[in-house]
Image: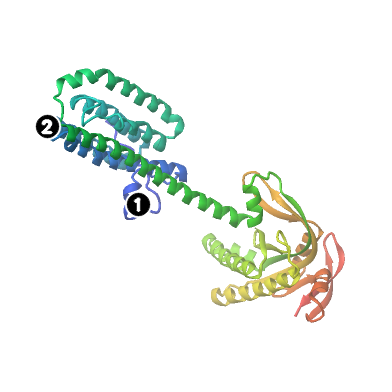
């Protein structure tokens, strides 16, 4: 006989109660599959405990103890096999088949559907477990099985009733209440757990969407807009490029490269939020942001310049701690731009236009540790800003007058 396949456990093991719910988890599970597996495991624990009410509602019948302990032991063994093999499909089918055998057997042995041990409502756990653990399509056949069991229990009810004495009225009432409330409570708790986890997953997706694209654009996508394209008449576009990063990356282990780049861009993200800019994207070791789009603002040039200066200071602080000789060049241009959402799978909000091209060229022709701005940005800042005028040759744009901020 072949040994059960030992599947790898997730890299990060759950702790506490999560460990008991994660018996069937695999590292590659998506959130939906992980949720179904954990609902199935909860159903297994419920199957261990729920049958123990049978001796109570049956008035202590000896056969009720045998049936209750038998199903509880079967459920425990099923959970142990799941923990060893991670074969969730087999586990759920075994769990449901156990109910298919137990419910009609207990109902017949204890006097039929109108007896204290009647299982019409208990049987509904079969399709309930199936739809929550296996999904709606796979549950259809199990719902049909449940209806078939109901028909079977009704057909056998006269025989079961004739073989069993009538239970006292108080016991019949108590049994009817327990046999209704307990299984429906199990279904309610499973549905509640599923909905809580679903809402948490939706909130996580919402957070990722909002982090990937501007909140106003994300809201429009949620409301069903298929193609978003806007003209923004007054923006200031910022490009910041890390000087010296390429030779550093060539001589440094990948983990350290990514860690430093993450630290740099996380700092830029915080500065963009602080100064009211919208991050557009990163391209290698370059960072692009905009002020004035998609939300208009009159001081977009001043905000962009404040961000640029703060980015230079942030890189200087990181350089002092890491001792990696990095600097940043910043280029800023102001003017109109076109923005929109592109892509179907990895959607992205992006900007296009002459303003974007000019800002990119000003960054690449700039001076490390300085902010270089276009004449359009200089005009919006006013005369109070100290600048150093210079003439630069920009690829595709020719000779342009630019300004280095003091």
The answer to which image quadrant residue 153 occupies is: top left
- The residue that disc 2 covers is 62
Tally the numbered discs: 2
Which residue does the image show at 40% across and 25% down from the upper left? 141
Q: Nearer the viewer, residue 144 or 205?
A: 144
- The residue that disc 1 covers is 18
Image coordinates of residue 310 in percent, x first then y, are 65, 74
Q: How is the image coloured?
A: rainbow
Does residue 73 appear in the picture of this structure?
A: no
Q: Is residue 233 above or below residue 66?
A: below
Q: Nearer the viewer, mark 2 or mark 1?
A: 2
Image coordinates of residue 217 in percent, x first then y, are 66, 53
Q: The N terminus lies in which quarter of the figure?
A: top left
Q: Is residue 320 above or below residue 53?
A: below
Structural distance between the alpha carbons of marks 2 and 1: 37 Å
For disc 1, the neighbor class at 10 Å (few under 14, some 14 to 19, many from 20) is few
Q: Nearer the viewer, residue 154 or 287?
A: 154
């Amino acid at each position: 006989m072949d040994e059960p396949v030992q599947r790898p456990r997730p890299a990060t093991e759950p702790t506490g109660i999560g460990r008991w719910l994660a018996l069937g988890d695999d590292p590659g599970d998506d959130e939906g599959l992980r949720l179904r597996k954990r609902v199935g495991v909860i159903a297994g624990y419920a199957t261990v405990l729920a049958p123990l009410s049978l001796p109570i509602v049956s008035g202590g019948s000896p056969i009720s103890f045998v049936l209750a302990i038998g199903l509880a032991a079967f459920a425990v063994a099923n959970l142990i096999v799941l923990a060893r093999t991670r074969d969730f499909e087999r586990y759920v089918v075994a769990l449901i088949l156990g109910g298919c055998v137990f419910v009609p057997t207990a109902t017949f042995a204890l006097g039929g559907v109108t007896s204290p041990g009647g299982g019409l409502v208990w049987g509904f756990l079969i399709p309930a477990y199936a739809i929550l653990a296996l999904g709606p399509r796979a549950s259809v056949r199990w719902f049909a099985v449940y209806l078939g069991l109901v028909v079977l229990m009704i057909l056998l009810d006269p025989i079961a009733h004739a073989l069993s004495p009538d239970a006292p009225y108080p016991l019949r009432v108590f049994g009817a209440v327990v046999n209704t409330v307990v299984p429906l409570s199990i279904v309610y708790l499973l549905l509640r757990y599923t909905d809580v986890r679903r809402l948490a997953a939706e909130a996580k997706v919402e957070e990722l969407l909002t982090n990937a694209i501007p909140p106003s654009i994300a809201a429009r996508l949620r409301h069903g807009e298929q193609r978003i394209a806007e003209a923004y008449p007054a923006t200031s576009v910022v490009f910041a490029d890390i000087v010296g990063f390429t030779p550093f990356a060539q001589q440094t282990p990948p983990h350290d490269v990514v860690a430093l780049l993450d630290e740099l861009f996380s700092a830029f993200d915080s500065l963009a939020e602080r100064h009211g800019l919208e991050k557009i994207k990163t391209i290698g070791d370059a960072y692009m942001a905009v002020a004035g789009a998609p939300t208009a603002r009159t001081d977009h040039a001043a905000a962009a310049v404040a961000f640029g200066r703060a980015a230079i200071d942030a890189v200087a602080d990181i350089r002092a701690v890491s001792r990696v000789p990095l600097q940043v060049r910043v280029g800023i241009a102001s003017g109109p731009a076109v923005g929109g959402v592109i892509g179907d799978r990895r959607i992205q909000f992006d900007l296009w236009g002459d303003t974007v091209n000019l800002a990119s060229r000003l960054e690449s022709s700039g001076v490390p540790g300085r902010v270089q701005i276009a004449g359009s940005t200089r005009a919006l800042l006013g005369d109070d800003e100290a600048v150093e005028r210079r003439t630069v040759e920009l690829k595709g744009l020719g000779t342009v007058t630019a300004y280095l901020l003091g």
